[in-house]
Amino acid sequence: MKAVRVTNASRGTILADRAWVADICLSRLRGLLGRRGLAPGEGLLLTPCRGIHTFGMRFPIDALYIAGNGRVILACTLMRPNRWGPWVRAATCVLELPAGTVMATATTAGDRLAVSAVQADPHARDPLSH
C-alpha cells in the first residue's frame, strides 16, 4: 500500500511521517477497524472521502477534512469510538491521525497541508493490516 508524508505547510510541522493511502472502496470501508491504535507518526488518508465514523473502533482519533486545494476545512479532535463524524461536502479527503496530533501541531481550519510520497518500509505496520 502507498505511504505518504503529510506536513502542515502553514506551520512547518509534520502531521504523519507515514500515512497509508486508502484510495479504493475496500480499503476505505475497512479503514482502521480492528486496529488497537495508531502509533505517533502514523495516519490514514481516505480519498475520496467527505465523512467518517468511528463505529467498531477501539480508540479515539483526530481527523482533518481536507479540500482539493490542500486546505484544512475542519479539524476534529479526540473523536471517540462509536460516533458519526460530520459529513463535509467540500472535503475531498480525510486524514485520520492519533488522538492529540491536531492539538500538538496547532493545526486549524485554513492551514495548507502538503502530501509527499515516501518509500514504504517493508517492515512498517500497515494500518490496514490487522
Image (cartoon, helix red, strand yellow):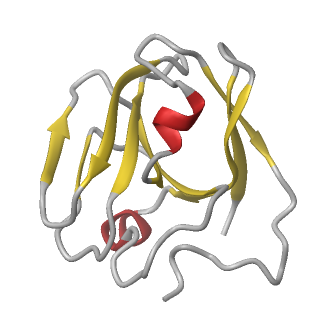
In the displayed orientation, state which residue is furthest to the bottom. Answer: 130
| Residue 101: x %, y % from top left | 52, 44
Residue drawn at x 33%, y 69% is: 59
For the N terminus, which image quadrant? bottom right
- Quadrant of the rendered structure where residue 112 is? top right
Drawn side of residue 25 relative to residue 123, left or right = left
Looking at the image, residue 27 lies above or below residue 115: below
Q: Is residue 51 above or below residue 80?
A: above
Residue 1 vs residue 112, the one in the foreground:
112
Front residue of 116 and 14? 14
> In the rendered view, would you say 97 is above or below 71?
below
Q: Position of residue 16 (x, y in %)?
A: 66, 48
How far from the left and from the top, in percent, is residue 43? Answer: 56, 56
Place of residue 109 in the rendered image (x, y in percent of width and height, measured from the top left):
40, 16
**Which image quadrant is residue 122 in?**
bottom right
Left or right relative to 67: residue 6: right
On screen, residue 47 versus residue 14, left or right, reads left
The image quarter in which residue 56 lies = bottom left
Q: Is residue 40 above or below residue 57?
A: above
Residue at horizontal 38%, vertical 63%?
28
Q: How many marks?
A: 0
Q: Residue at x 29, y 21 (%)?
A: 90
74, 103: nearer the viewer: 103
